[in-house]
Image: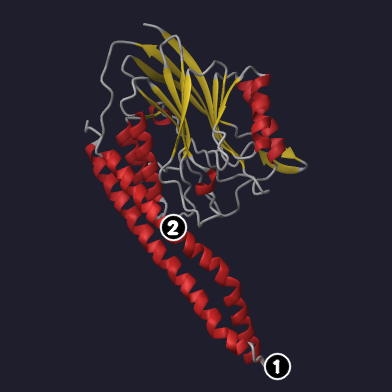
Amino acid sequence: MSRETLRLASLNVWALPLGIARHVAPRMKAIGERIGELDVDVVALQEVWTEEARAALVAGGRDVGLEHIWHNPAARGGSGLLFLSRRPFVDVEFHAYTLRGLPQRVHHGDYWGGKGFALARLETEGGPVTLLDTHLHAQYTDDPIDEYRGMRTGQAIQLAATVRGRPDPIVALGDFNLRTGNPDHAVLMGLSGFTDVALALDNPQDTILADHPYRGGGHSEGERIDYAFVRTGQHADAIPTSIEREFDARFEVEGEAATYSDHAGLLVEVDIASGAERALPGADPVALRRARSLLAQGRSEAQRRRGVERSLAVGAGALAVAALPVASQLRASRRGFLAGVAAGLGVACLPSAGLVATLSEVAVPAELAAYDEVEALLDGFEPA
């Protein structure tokens, strides 16, 4: 039996454009320096969404021997994913998510970021291994009724369908935006055959920390949404031996409290060991049923959203049309002033409401078609 240990790190670096993220340049420099101290073979990064951040991280990696680089050079979006590796990749694939977010929710950004997952193949002494880096759709509310759960479920299905049947052992890293115990998390685990490294080694730790310089007040609990998963291969296994939270140290930037990112990261050691041929894990029938149910809920949410956005556009238009004649005959009175305010609000809201409604009319049919495409993938899963 041949065996080799891979030392891997993962971090959502929070390098957002337009000044949304704080301290980006000094944080990218600090991340690069910390990577050098960790002596890793591969780093999987997420939210590298500016050229400046990418250049800084690539330079930091090359300074410590991580000379082999992959990122998606798409003109728009690009996924924000970045691999830095000490050894060359045999090949790398990028798969854009079919269900990728909502174009009309510009402030959420997932659609425009071009999210997906990258599969990078490496040769080791224990045989080839496939590394996966991804960033699933965010959850923007603590409300149990999460309007993006259907999309994250679709992304989990697409990811699981892509790795299903691949003969290599797999090590998956990234910001999965999944809460352990939630139904979309159960779908991913049940369809992919993944093992959660932190649970397997009895060391689960929050990666979104309650006490954090980049997190607003009022958060009494942390969350674990960044993961390392492994899956066996046909002729080799991925055996996790260590996992620790990383990139969580505090420092100062220009007199302000800072740290590497708004997430903590992970440092993982996995043995790739050759062995006798074995069958790949099959899908959990319960996960298959749950996946179809969550996709149906996602379709219903898309239809509901289109109805709400249509109503907003109609309401803004009606307000503007009704208020304009009154506003044209303004008198110096409270009633005249209020009519003017109403007219102004109606006119101001009309373009944005119309744009949202127009995008929704285009996006919802595409979203429903994407749900159909993803559900068709479930037909290819064989129950365990």
Reading the chain from its start, which is encountered first: label 2 or label 1?
1
Corner quadrant of residue 43: top right
How far, Cα to Cα, is label 2 from label 1?
A: 44 Å
Q: Residue at x 34, y 21 (%)?
A: 232
Residue 250 appears in the rendering: no
Label 1: which secondary element: loop
Q: Which mark, residue 362?
A: 2
Label 1: few (<14), some (14–19) or many (≥20) C-alpha neighbours in 10 Å: few
Residue 163 vs residue 275, the one in the foreground: 163
Whether pointer 2 and pointer 1 mark residues with C-beta atoms closer than 8 Å, the reply is: no
Task: Identify the residue at the far top of this view.
Answer: 1
Type of the residue with mark 2: Val
Instruction: Give the percent coordinates (x, y) of residue 239.
Output: 39, 19
Q: Which residue is mark 1?
A: 332
Q: Residue at x 60, y 35 (%)?
A: 248
Residue 309 vs residue 14, the one in the foreground: 309
> Comparing marks 2 and 1, which lies closer to the viewer?
2
Residue 235, above or below 114: above
Q: Quadrant of the N terminus?
A: top left
Type of the residue with mark 1: Ala
Instruction: Give the percent coordinates (x, y) of residue 20.
Output: 65, 49
Q: Quadrant of the C terminus?
A: top left
